[in-house]
Image (spheres, rainbow, N blue to C red):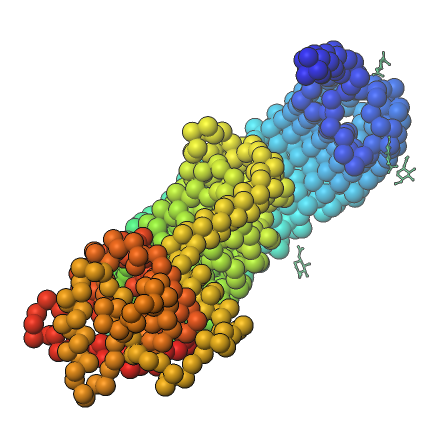
């Protein structure tokens, strides 16, 4: 009843919440943070009036505003940034900024503005950036003349027919003017006179149908440092005219990409002679013919981009580019490159020649590039199958530091192939088809090398000496090179004391020795993923697990993904105190030994995804989880029971660590009750509730077990306890009256036997008595009992006056009631008083212990072995039996 009532009330409450909640929010769904309001993409038609008054930034872009009324901005007088782009604003009111005097950035791109009313920006004096791109504007009446602080003005993609934005001189602070994508067909002499006092870093006139540059058109600009004319159909004639117009300007940066400049003549750039042009972009022009000495005018040029053209490199092509530092020739060459073509470029530092086809590297191809630092020939089809000691001999005098030869179809590296590159620091030979044994001589002469990339080659066979000539190596990449056998002694990495990164992943390595990484004190990153190392860590591995990670004190990142690992020896990560990132994903790990990660207390990320882990227990994962920032343990068959997962579920609910897929990929597999549910939702409180019960269970079990043990002990060993107890009591309390000295005994032994065994007794004991040698006297009932004394009394007396008591045990004795009760009782009494040695058992038949106990309350175990005698079946052993009996009779009766 109670429960139902609560349910009903709570569901009603939830429903009421949903009814009233939208009203409470009053339609304002803007995202507000630190005085910035983001109201973009909300289909708004007006500026919301309920934003905090003190916002400095308002993004109202991507909505459906039709106008931007200054009145609507009254509340937000602190605005510095206003983005109203991507709306349908077709009209602006005068004095747009009158209520937002602090506005610095105004973005109105992608609207439907056709006209700017007079005085629209009159109050926007603090504006530094104004974006009016992608409207339909035509400019009249100097609308920008008040923008004394404007740095950037974007009017691209409008309907401008002229670059003339005003008659008066204005925009003194302008740096960038974007006029691309308009309908400007000519630049008249006075068009830019409004920029008379302006220093433009960039004037962008791209994508205009420019046909004519009138004389002096650029000279009216205060200073013009950068000009972008991409996608303007210039061709050779207009390019030449342009350069003439640019002569004696401050031009530094000229971009002429996609201007249909297929031919460059000797005088095309002549106009630039007097300039300090430093950057020239001529990419994507289908350039095929460049006359000799065409660049002679550009002695200040530092960056030349000729990307994506079709140029034949002749020996005087680069003549005069004496300042060039950076030459981009990506996908731009055709035919052969003549020897000494580059020797004009004695300041060249970066030569990038990726994606080209040419017949090959000739003997003097790079001669003269004495300042070259970086050479990239990636993905070139240049017959580089064999690298010999001649291939790069033209760079002997250079100080090349980086050589990138990826994807150049190299198959063989000959001895000392790079010996002319003694300054080289980075050599990239990845993604080739190298197939050879590395003897070490390949890299001889690379005295300053730091990084060698050999990843993704066909078949590299390593040997101990493979890197003997490059002890300065810091980074060695050998991913997927087919070096499956690294069981080498000494290790090929033995000399690489400065190595910090080693990648030998994807090699199907199955055999390595324990000392493979010995001495790599500085190793920081070790990649071993996608190998076959499972056997090495198996318990059953002949010679024990191979602990190849020892002696890597500075290892920070270790990748062991996809190695088929199903066992991890507990010592394997010991000593790796610096480990921050450990990847054990995609293996077959199930149970990890406790304390495995105890040295990894500063681990930042751990990957154990796609294993067979069922339980995540504190004794294994407590230490490494302490400082973890990222855990990837998804896709394991978690066992959602208290013992296996409770601790983990609690940790997941509390941790700040990043756990991708926590709400989708951490799923219980067992028990059936939880199959398919999220580990995160495992209710560990049930486990905690059971804790007291568990304790109770343990205690009660212990009590029951102890009780059962005591009962069983008493049952089976009780006689022994009772016996010793009696002995002990008698020892302590003393039964002085019974103590006698040896000589006080009349007989050596009183013999208890059944009537039926009389004959055996007479025969054997009398014969013993007769033997003078032994001097033994038995007390035999038939012979020695005094006449007239009751048997009862006689028995007691005889027992008392005999030193020992002999039981002749037969089935008959067990049946004899007289023996059973009285005699045995007294014999035992005697034994207790004197010593357990005082009783001797002689078995004439094989009598089981339980029968003996049942009948006489005696057990073999009560007596010393020398006091238990068996009547031998064989005649020849009888004398030995006698000997044995005499020994038993003569020995001291004492409890020890
Ligand atoms: C801006 O106003 C909000 C309340 O509207 C206030 O919480 C915040 O502290 C104010 N920020 C500043 C910088 O005054
Ligand atoms: C915006 O201004 C218009 C015209 O001045 C007015 O009708 C409208 O209510 C204002 N909207 C807001 C949200 O202030
Ligand atoms: C421009 O901003 C400054 C503060 O940054 C302010 O003092 C000045 O009045 C503003 N200019 C105008 C015209 O409002
Ligand atoms: C370029 O100018 C030359 C003469 O200066 C003329 O012969 C040639 O036809 C022009 N080319 C184009 C494409 O206009
Ligand atoms: C080119 O640079 C030099 C040195 O920096 C300078 O003296 C000269 O005036 C510059 N020329 C032009 C046209 O800017
Ligand atoms: C290049 O190797 C050849 C043998 O292959 C040798 O004769 C020649 O001297 C070497 N040249 C240089 C510059 O080391
Ligand atoms: C070599 O060039 C390739 C392709 O551009 C690039 O991916 C690689 O990072 C470069 N190698 C080096 C060492 O910079
Ligand atoms: C790899 O090269 C070694 C010799 O360097 C050769 O014995 C082995 O068969 C080669 N393996 C493959 C797969 O080509
Ligand atoms: C290893 O690095 C140290 C320190 O950067 C340097 O002094 C030493 O010369 C390097 N060893 C080799 C063999 O290059």
Q: Is residue 50 toward the left or the right of residue 893 in the image?
A: right
Outermost front residue: 788
Q: Is residue 383 above or below residue 259?
A: below
Residue in front for this viewpoint, 55 or 65: 55
Query: Looking at the figure, which quarter contains the C terminus?
Result: bottom left
Report the residue at 21% width, 60% height from top: 755
Drawn side of residue 547 relative to residue 650, left or right: left
The quarter holding residue 46 reads: top right
Residue furthest bottom as drawn? 773
Q: Position of residue 463 (x, y in %)?
A: 27, 69
Q: Residue visible at 15% across and 78% down?
A: 767
Residue 344 appears in the rendering: no
Choose top left, top right, bottom left or bottom right for residue 364.
bottom left
Q: Position of residue 163 (x, y in %)?
A: 68, 31
Q: Which residue reaches farthest left?
A: 875
Image point (61%, 42%), residue name: 692
> Against 881, is 626 above or below?
above
Please state the horizontal and vertical placement of residue 849, each as a whole percent of the image.
Answer: 27, 57
């Amino acid at each position: 009843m109670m429960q139902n009532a609560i349910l009903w009330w709570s569901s009603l409450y939830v429903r009421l919440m949903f009814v009233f909640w939208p009203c409470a929010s009053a339609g304002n769904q803007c995202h507000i943070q630190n005085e910035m309001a983001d109201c973009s993409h909300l289909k708004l038609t007006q500026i919301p009036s309920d934003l905090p008054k003190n916002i400095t930034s308002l993004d109202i872009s991507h909505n459906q505003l039709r106008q931007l009324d200054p009145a609507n901005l009254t509340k937000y007088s602190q605005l510095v940034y206003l983005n109203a782009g991507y709306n349908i604003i077709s009209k602006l009111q005068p004095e747009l900024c009158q209520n937002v005097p602090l506005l610095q950035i105004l973005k109105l791109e992608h609207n439907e503005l056709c006209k700017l009313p007079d005085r629209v920006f009159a109050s926007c004096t603090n504006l530094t950036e104004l974006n009016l791109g992608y409207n339909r504007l035509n400019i009249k009446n100097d609308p920008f003349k008040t923008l004394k602080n404007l740095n950037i003005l974007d009017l691209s993609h409008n309907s401008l027919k002229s670059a003339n934005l005003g008659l008066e001189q204005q925009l003194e602070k302008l740096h960038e003017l974007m006029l691309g994508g308009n309908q400007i067909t000519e630049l008249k002499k006075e068009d830019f006179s409004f920029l008379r006092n302006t220093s433009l870093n960039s004037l962008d006139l791209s994508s205009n149908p420019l046909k004519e540059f009138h004389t002096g058109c650029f000279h009216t600009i205060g200073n013009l440092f950068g000009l972008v004319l991409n996608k303007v159909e210039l061709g050779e004639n207009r390019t030449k005219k342009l350069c003439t117009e640019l002569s004696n300007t401050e031009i530094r940066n000229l971009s002429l990409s996609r201007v249909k400049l297929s031919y460059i003549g000797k005088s095309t750039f002549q106009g630039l002679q007097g300039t300090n042009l430093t950057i020239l972009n001529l990419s994507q022009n289908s350039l095929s013919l460049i006359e000799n000495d065409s660049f002679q005018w550009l002695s200040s040029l530092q960056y030349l981009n000729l990307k994506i053209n079709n140029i034949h490199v002749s020996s005087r092509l680069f003549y005069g580019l004496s300042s060039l530092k950076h030459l981009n020739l990506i996908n731009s060459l055709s035919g052969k490159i003549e020897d000494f073509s580059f020797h004009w470029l004695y300041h060249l530092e970066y030569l990038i020649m990726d994606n080209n086809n040419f017949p090959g590297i000739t003997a003097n191809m790079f001669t003269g590039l004495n300042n070259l630092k970086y050479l990239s020939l990636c993905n070139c089809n240049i017959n580089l199958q064999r690298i010999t000691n001649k291939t790069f001999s033209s760079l002997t005098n250079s100080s090349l530091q980086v050589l990138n030869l990826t994807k150049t179809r190299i198959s063989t590296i000959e001895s000392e192939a790079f010996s002319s590159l003694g300054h080289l620091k980075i050599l990239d030979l990845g993604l080739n088809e190298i197939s050879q044994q590395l003897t070490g001589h390949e890299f001889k002469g690379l005295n300053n090398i730091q990084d060698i990339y050999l990843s993704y080659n066909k078949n590299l066979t390593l040997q101990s000496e493979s890197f003997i000539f490059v002890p300065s190596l810091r980074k060695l990449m050998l991913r997927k090179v087919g070096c499956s056998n690294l069981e080498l002694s000494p290790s090929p990495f033995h000399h690489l004391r400065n190595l910090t990164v080693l990648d030998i992943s994807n090699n199907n390595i199955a055999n390595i020795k324990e000392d493979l990484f010995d001495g790599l004190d500085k190793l920081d990153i070790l990649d071993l993923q996608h190998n076959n190392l499972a056997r090495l860590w198996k318990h059953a591995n002949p010679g024990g697990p191979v602990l190849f990670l020892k002696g890597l004190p500075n290892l920070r990142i270790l990748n062991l993904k996809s190695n088929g690992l199903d066992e991890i020896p507990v010592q394997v990560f010991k000593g790796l105190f610096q480990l921050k990132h450990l990847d054990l994903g995609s293996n077959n790990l199930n149970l990890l030994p406790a304390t495995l990660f105890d040295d990894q207390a500063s681990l930042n990320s751990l990957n154990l995804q796609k294993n067979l882990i069922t339980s995540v227990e504190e004794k294994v994962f407590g230490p490494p989880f302490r400082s973890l920032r990222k855990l990837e343990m998804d896709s394991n068959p978690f066992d959602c029971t208290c013992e296996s997962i409770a601790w983990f579920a609690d940790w997941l609910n509390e941790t700040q660590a990043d756990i991708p897929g926590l709400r989708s990929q951490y799923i219980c597999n067992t028990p059936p009750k939880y199959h398919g549910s999220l580990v995160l939702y495992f209710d560990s409180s049930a486990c905690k509730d059971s804790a007291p019960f568990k304790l109770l269970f343990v205690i009660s079990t212990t009590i029951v077990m102890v009780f059962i043990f005591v009962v069983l002990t008493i049952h089976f060993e009780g006689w022994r306890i009772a016996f010793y107890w009696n002995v002990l009591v008698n020892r302590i309390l003393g039964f002085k009256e019974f103590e006698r000295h040896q000589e006080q005994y009349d007989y050596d032994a009183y013999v208890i036997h059944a009537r039926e065994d009389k004959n055996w007794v007479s025969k054997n004991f009398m014969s013993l008595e007769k033997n003078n040698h032994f001097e033994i006297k038995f007390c035999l009932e038939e012979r020695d009992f005094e006449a007239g004394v009751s048997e009862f009394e006689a028995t007691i007396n005889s027992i008392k006056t005999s030193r020992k008591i002999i039981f002749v045990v037969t089935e008959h004795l067990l049946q004899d009631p007289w023996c059973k009760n009285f005699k045995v009782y007294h014999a035992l009494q005697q034994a207790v008083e004197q010593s357990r040695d005082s009783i001797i058992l002689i078995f004439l038949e094989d009598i089981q212990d339980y029968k003996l106990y049942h009948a006489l309350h005696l057990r073999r175990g009560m007596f010393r072995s020398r006091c238990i005698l068996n009547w031998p079946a064989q005649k020849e052993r009888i004398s030995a039996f006698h000997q044995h009996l005499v020994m038993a009779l003569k020995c001291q009766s004492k409890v020890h």
